[in-house]
Amino acid sequence: QVQLVESGGGLVQAGGSLRLSCAASGRTFSSYAMGWFRQAPGKERELVAAVNWSGGITYYVDSVKGRFTISRDNAKKTVYLQMNSLSPEDTAVYYCAAAGSSHYHITSAEYRYWGQGTQVTVSS
């Protein structure tokens, strides 16, 4: 069992930065690939970034490449999402999720555990 708690969301102006954190409980955090999803009002939840168990392999959706960076610290049982050059289009609730395997997946159905979400609002 893994419990996930996100933090770091908030209100930021366009062009600004935020760093999201997701703290996990449980002894098997390092066994799971992790992902950050987001869901904007009226839109489907989408995978923003993912990282495999070791942190050595990452994935980014095209819209955030070059702006967002996912990383993890297995000793601290925490995964991060550094978000730079934010735009109003990045406004959404951001969720972290743990996959049921050590390699990341693109689809949300492959993620077993979810956090409660943290709101990110980017003003123009």
Image (tube, helix red, strand yellow):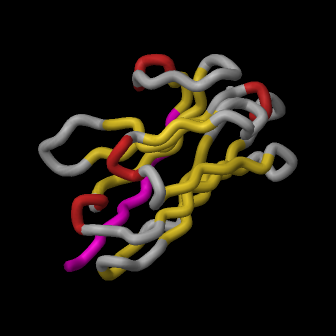
Residue 39 coordinates in the image, percent (x, y): 29, 45
Q: Is residue 97 above or below residue 90?
A: above
Q: Position of residue 119 (x, y in %)?
A: 36, 61
Name the residue at 71% across, 48% down. 72
Main SS, magenta residues: strand
Identity of the residue drawn at 46% across and 74% down: 17
Magenta segment: 114-124
Is 47 on the left-hand or right-hand side of 111?
Answer: left
Quadrant for the N terminus in the image: top right
Please give left or right for residue 89 compared with residue 31 in the image. left
Q: Nearer the viewer, residue 113 or 34?
A: 34
Where is residue 14 shown, x and y percent of the image?
30, 77
Q: Which of 88 and 23 lies nearest the eye of the viewer?
A: 88
Residue positioned most to the front:
66
Q: Split into 4 quadrants, where in the image is the C terminus?
A: bottom left
| Residue 70 is one of the magenta-drawn residues | no
Image height of 27 relative to 76, above or below: above
In the rendered image, residue 121 lying in the magenta stretch gets the answer yes
Q: Is residue 17 above or below residue 70?
A: below
What residue is shown at x 56% (from left), y 55% (from top)? Answer: 69
